[in-house]
Image (spheres, rainbow, N blue to C red):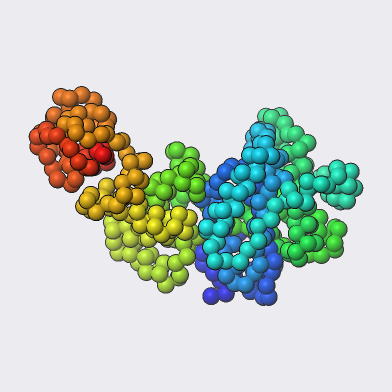
Amino acid sequence: MKLSEELTWRGFVNQTTFQDISELNDGPISFYIGVDPSADSLQIGNLAAIMMVRKFIEHGHKAYMLVGGATGLIGDPDGKSSERSAKTIEEIASNKAKIAAQYDQVLAGQDFTVVDNYEWFKDMKYLDFLRNVGKYVPTSSMLNRDFVKTRLGAEGNGISYAEFSYSLIQAFDFLHLFREYGVTLQLCGGDQWGNSIAGVDLIRRLENREVNVYSMPLLQNKSTGVKFGKTEGGAVWLDSNKTSVYKYYQYWLNCDDAGVIDYLKIFTLLNREEIEKLSQEVTNNPEGRAAQKALAYEATKLVHGQQRTESVQRVTGVLFGGADFNTLQGEDIDMLASEIPVVGKDKSLIEILVQGGSADSNSEARRLITGGAVSVNSEKVSDDRPINSLSLVKKGKNSFILVR
């Protein structure tokens, strides 16, 4: 499958300056994509963009992954109703390192180069920037940006000169990479189109050369219409300290039938034949959730590795699939302990239910037990008893306590 065909099939086509995206099938192109280190982790929205990048690399194009140490100090104002809080250089440096490590994980085995715009901005003189760059950027194009109009409008909160200049700084990134590495293409999300076009215009004015932008669509949950990657608890992060491996896996496992095949195309390395087979499974046996299970496994393995993915599979199988609790390994127990209440052993089952929050009182705990609502290591119990060893206590379908 040619690159243009694969991008179309996987759902990575949106706005572009190319007359025809089949131009991407021609010789190798040096391209870049940027992210600001405004947080110490990427989200799964960023993961979608990285998966698009991976396809470009696999088809022979040269990737430059820009982690914006300079733009991170300003903060992208697009889509923001008020001024961002400034981050320190130390925060930005720490965030950059963590994001670069995530690139290494997701793009393992691929050829790419990480660059940082702080390196070319840190020694730049202000007057030189105004004379050599600012003089060639019309303010009309900056004032016409939607976020600028909104912030400057009657209901807006205003905008600082720093944030107003953000697109100018990003435009220079494209110019610098064009000059230093021969980069002629910027990849971006649909919300970065305006900032990216600024670079195309600057290169045309200063270098008399045509370069291009290629954007991917912003993803939405097909069932809810909500921006993809958002939950009631907030964003879904790639860093397991912010979104645990268990919660990350569960997010994919609980994806809706309407969107699961699209998500498989974007967030996994499965090929067309494999995904089409899973699509048929969704049609023939939606209750089996084969597509969701494949998505959860593949997307988690990509970010967290096979060992942790197999561990979360075992934990999920015990909690919701009827698997034997005694098959869990040490790392599985540790993962389980971070997700459900933990109570010390050598207590009665009634005490464990109350201390673990599954019952409000001893009498309620006793009613749950005699009513057949409680099991220990998948076996129903009907009377109170001491629990003296590592055990999993379950109330109903979704309430668990680990005894250790």
Compared to residue 339, the image places residue 10 above or below, namely below
Q: Is residue 77 left or right of residue 316?
A: right
Residue 71: x and y in percent read: 71, 45
Name the residue nearer the viewer: 268 or 115: 115
Residue 114 visible: yes
Residue 226: x and y in percent read: 49, 44
Which of the 4 quarters of the picture holds residue 166?
top right
Compared to residue 331, the image places residue 112 above or below, namely below
The residue lying at 30 percent from left, 64 percent from top is 284
Which of the 4 quarters of the picture holds residue 212?
bottom right
Name the residue nearer the viewer: 383 or 223: 383
Name the residue nearer the viewer: 129 or 391: 391
Number of numbered tags placed on the structure image: 0
Residue 171 visible: no
The residue lying at 13 percent from left, 29 percent from top is 366
Residue 395: x and y in percent read: 21, 38
Q: Is residue 313 left or right of residue 82?
A: left
The residue lying at 27 percent from left, 34 percent from top is 343
**Quarter occupied by the C terminus:** top left
Q: Is residue 224 left or right of residue 400?
A: right
The residue lying at 77 percent from left, 42 percent from top is 165
Q: Is residue 327 left or right of residue 384?
A: right
Residue 305: x and y in percent read: 44, 57
